[in-house]
Amino acid sequence: MKTMFRWSSQHDGHRSVARCRTRVAVGWRCSGVLALCCRGRVRDGAAWFWFGLSYFEEQTEQGKAVMAGTTEAGFGALLGVPPLVVAHIIGLGILCPIVMTGRRRLANGAMFAVIAVAAASLIGLVVGEIVWQGQLFMMGAGAAGHVVP
């Protein structure tokens, strides 16, 4: 753990009693980083669920669209991918400045932030696959059957 020392004085009335060094944690173990990573897992899980929900909507509405002489192809990508990308960008935008604080090489902090967001996304992807019964990437307008989760 990288620490910085800050000198502080303890006062007893008007006179200074002692000067002591207090440790201030910076960088990866900074307060709140673990909480942000946990929230990232929830955020990415919700983004992957929304991704599956948009493709499920495309798949279930395709039959009606064909009867009306149109198609639902592309609806899932239009409503599912942008929130997923924005969720990852927000995660990096929040986590990068926090983990880069107090590091000599900022690239190391950025690398840790990318790894944390990727790990949260992977957990969200696994949860999405479980929720959608392994059909997360097989849904859409061209899917063979309908999936009822």
Image (tube, rainbow, N blue to C red):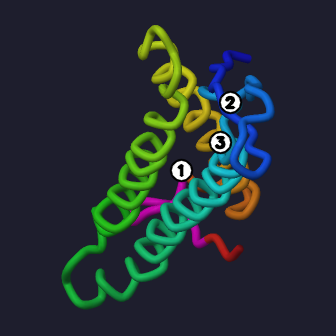
SS for tag 3? helix
Residue 44: which quarter of the image?
bottom right
Q: Is residue 94 above or below residue 77?
A: above
Residues rendered magenta in the picture: 137-146
Going from N to C along the chain, the mark reached first, 2 or 3, is 2
Residue 52 magenta: no
Name the foreground residue: 118 vs 13: 13
Which residue is found at the position 52% from the left and 71% from the top? 53
In the image, residue 144 lies at what x, y percent?
52, 61
Sequence-first tag of 2 and 1: 2
Between label 1 and label 3, give the one nearer the viewer. 3
Residue position for label 2: 24
Looking at marks 1 and 3 on the same chain, the residue that comes earlier in the sequence is marked by 3
Q: Residue at x 38, y 77 (%)?
A: 62
Prevailing secondary structure class for the magenta stretch in the rendered image: loop
**Residue 33: mark in rendering:** 3
Residue occupying image coordinates x 25% and y 74%: 71
* Percent coordinates x, y for residue 132 in the rendering: 68, 63
> Tag 1: residue type?
Phe
Q: Which residue is mark 1?
A: 137
Residue 144 seen in the figure? no
